[in-house]
Image (spheres, coloured by chain):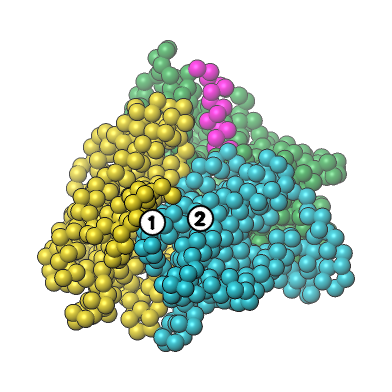
Amino acid sequence: MSNISRRNFVMTAAAGSLLAPAGLRTALGADEVLKVGVIHQGAIADTGWEYFQAQAWRSLDKAFPGKVKVTVLENITQTQDAERLFRQLSTQDHRLIFGTTFSHFASLKKLAPTLKKSVFECCAGIEASDNLGVFEARHYEGTYLTGIAAGRMTKSNILGWVGAFPVPQVIYSLNAFMLGARSVNPNATLKIVWVNAWVDPGKEKDGVAALVAQGADVISGSPNTPVQGLAAEEKGVWAIGSTGDFSAYVKKGQLTSFELDWSAAHIEAARAVMAGDWKPSTRWRGLGPGGFVKMTTNNPDLPQNVVAEMKAAETAIVDGKLNPFKGPIKDQNGVQKVAANAVIPDAELKGMNWLVDGVQGKLPSAG
Amino acid sequence: MPLTLEPRPQPSAAMVYLSPLIAVALTGAIALVVFAAAGLDPLPALVTFVTAPIADFYGVGELLIKATPLVLMGVGLAVGFRAAVWNVGAEGQLILGVISGGALALHFGPGGSAALLPAMVVAGAVSGALWAAIPALLRTHFNANEILVSLMLNYVAQLWLSYLVFGPWRDPAGFNFPQSAPLAPAALFPIVLEDTRLNVSAFIALAAVALGWVLMSRSFIGFQLRVTGLAEDAARYAGFSTRRMVWIGMLAGGFTAGIAGVGEIAGPLGQIFPTASPGYGYAAIIVAFVGRLNPIGILFAGLLMSLLYLSGDTAQMALGLPSSVTGLFQGTMLFLLLAIDVLIYYRLRNVSVAPVSAVPVSRAPVLPAPIAAEAAR
Amino acid sequence: MIDGAIGILVATVVAGTPLVYAALGELVTERSGVLNLGVEGMMLCGAVSGFAVAMMTGSVWQGVGAAMVVGAGVAFLFGVLAISLKANQVAVGLALAIFGTGLSSFIGKKYVGQAIVLEPSALSVAVGKLPLVGPLLGQLHPLVWLSWVLLGAVSYFLYRTRTGLVLRAVGESPRSAYAIGYKVVRIRYLATLFGGAMAGVGGAYISLVYTSLWTEGLVAGRGWIAVGLVVFATWRPGRCLLGAYLFGGVTTAQLFAQGAGARVPTELMSALPYLATIIVLVLISRDATLIRLNVPASLGKPFHAEN
């Protein structure tokens, strides 16, 4: 097992111990091959959300050569179909099955109790149960660091965020981006436009244009394709590869980036299932060894001192000394939401529904 | 060209029934070619493609539950298509069913009541019919082309649903994701086959088939619909009101589509998403055609279409083919059917013989020859 | 301020250009009496083939050329079924849309998520240096300018040339045109192929210029919008252009408004173009004279020559 940072280990152990092991799972025989099933909602590209999900199951073959066989389904856009296929995978002896998106969670929650011979893991799921584990990345740790770069490099002090959906994962990500920027540049502000889609190249491009028209000179978001980066580059502003390194396409304009790396979750689950000691758990990991967030390339034009600042912050986060959401933090309206030296607890982060000071954009009204 | 198409004096009854079978067979042949090109052993691949999805009870249940909205809507649409009333708005009408049924489910679901489900079905049917009434009204009063109006209304309906799910109906416990709260058990259709997702709505579809058959083959209205579709002038001369046919045709389509919408959320979905329908409204049009606008035919066509959906996923899982094969095969099947249909009205002739010019046969919805002859009388 | 206005204008024009191509193509097709609902499928096929060829050759124009050929090819399929075999045009169009979507997805599999990084067109850069119009025009790809040229060409063709007159006659009364001796079937085929080629260009524009990448659902329903757009424009080319910018601009305008801090009822705004189309349709249809003046009389009805 790779080194897990103290913080992550404590998290995992705590979560695991709260849930009683569900029955005896038999270990795999010496010659048996573990059949793993994975369902993708979209198409697997060469970067973006689905790509990272795919990299994770691809890593299984490298970690356990010859002992794992993965069945992959792509483009299962409708939840009804996903539900049927999860079930089919299970009845076809796939003992470890991965869901790759939030919308899989509802189906898996329904199905898992009826399909005891399989173990399910849902990325971006909410809560674990008997034979269902969940894991998600602390995207905000990555966005905090990119925020440092953005805060330093902005000239207009206006940053831009192309918002996919106003869900907590996006909200805490952009909040951390703002906090990271403000940690080095107290005058930075952030504008948001909501495109209401994870992938809609036309709208994303227009979103970037709209932000740039407002004076933003560093653009971030939840890009799944290079379109945001390319649009920013075209307009002569910086792009941040939040959840994806698009520098292969955005050769000059990408300032910095981070990627998601789910392989630890996949490998740990596979090992446990093969050894027969899998237990349900809720993993929420960010930077650091065994974590799900990995910083990647920095633009050669990013000054060395900024890179050093980012590195220092990264080390501090991994060592548990720096928490992006440590108070005092005010919200958009100036109300203090987090007291000095207090930290936002995980449960609250998972449901985060407010924007920090400096963010200039509204959350679309919920009913 | 060495071959030419010569009109038949009378539509060929044999071809009416043969044409879909030939189309399916040819689609199968094309599938074999596709499989071979993909490096698979074609025949076993085709067998897997066709049988794997229904290899167990659950699969059969899935087949039936996916066919349900297709058959239901197909029958409703066929009523209109017979009268040459082209309702392309089934998708939007289905969404209206989702909206109205969903509204009831979200408000009264938690309270729980035996009357809730029937109320949802009624609401869905009525709202779907009302949405279809718009193009009907605009056609009868303003001569507006119902194809285009109903098509545009699909978008409006979709946006309406988006607004609701992103806004007032968003699940407070759903972390701001655009989805409604899961529907309460009282708002879900009871399952009929244990361990599957097959629910009561399948019976509604069967009832629609039966009713549709009675309406179209055994009632005077059915007769009027056919005549209007075949020869509008003749129909008017006979005193049949085209207006009435437009209304009946559009409302039937909207009625069934609305119920199908309720069936989706009260069935396999159990929740309301902005993308409640994966294009069933359009697929149902194909089903209506492949089913020869005949309720019994539509029943089989719906099952076939449903199988194609399921097989597409199987193709990925068992054969390693991309998911796009579903759309490819569905489209191909319809193309072939429409092409082969030609042989109902025309036959291939060698042009060495000077063709006799015959009275052109109007292209109307396809019917077996005896009925067409009767209608033309 | 001027910069901002220019920015929105440019974005609107860019967003509307694929619609201009697709709608003008469909307009010509419909003017000959053929209703091709399969525009979405044709645009997708054009988008994916244009992208694939551009990836292989590095040239946008070769990609556009390929897209035209593929679009016309797919339209030919439609023509065979709807014109020669006289099948129901609604059904064939739908089948085409579904088939085209599946085909493009199939072909595009290996390109999903990839982006093409193209040099900004040398022509655009040169034009950008022109005084006055430079800042605006220079931001637009030559395909945008060509769309304006296309508009002029289509208008001229339809209203100022004999062939255009014949095409319109075929759309109004194929029987009479046939009686005079015009080759109705051939004219309809050509109009359909043209429509397919233009839809292909519209699709290629999206995948090569607008977003420079290929992904599933790239065209996002624009093909269907184009069909409605032709109605909205009452089958007049000039109005097609305006309508395209209106339809295309609605989404863009929403995003810009958001960026500026305004609260926009997104769905309502997005619905307006469709509602407007219905209203226009009603307005022009309510009177037999108005209809005759606007809608090609034989639209959607197959022509039986029985030669």
Find out whether residue A64 is within the magenta segment.
yes
Residue topped by disc 1:
C85
A285 vs B234: above or below:
above
Q: Position of residue A243 (x, y in %)?
A: 64, 44
Tag 2–tag 1 contact (CB < 8 Å): no
Q: Position of residue B223 (x, y in %)?
A: 17, 69
Q: Residue sitting at 50 percent across and 17 percent down?
A: A66
Classify mark 2: residues with Cα within 10 Å, few (<14), some (14-19) or many (20+): many
Type of the residue with mark 1: Leu
Is any part of residue A322 visible from this angle?
no
The residue nearer to you, when weighing A134 against C10, is C10
Q: Position of residue C32 (x, y in %)?
A: 49, 69
The dominant secondary structure in magenta is helix
Count of residue discs: 2
Q: Colour of chain C?
A: cyan
Residue topped by disc 2:
C75
Find out whether residue C31 is within the magenta segment.
no
Indicate the chain on which mark 1 is placed: C
Q: Colour of chain B?
A: yellow
Report the chain shown in green. A
The residue nearer to you, when weighing B219 against A110, is B219
The residue nearer to you, when weighing B370 against B84, is B370
B282 vs A115: above or below:
below
Classify mark 1: residues with Cα within 10 Å, few (<14), some (14-19) or many (20+): many
| Part of the protein shown in magenta | A52-66
Furthest residue in direction top, as rendered: A30
Kind of element beneath mark 2:
helix
Q: Residue sitting at 43 percent across and 22 percent down?
A: A34
Q: Earlier in the sequence, mark 2 or mark 1?
A: 2
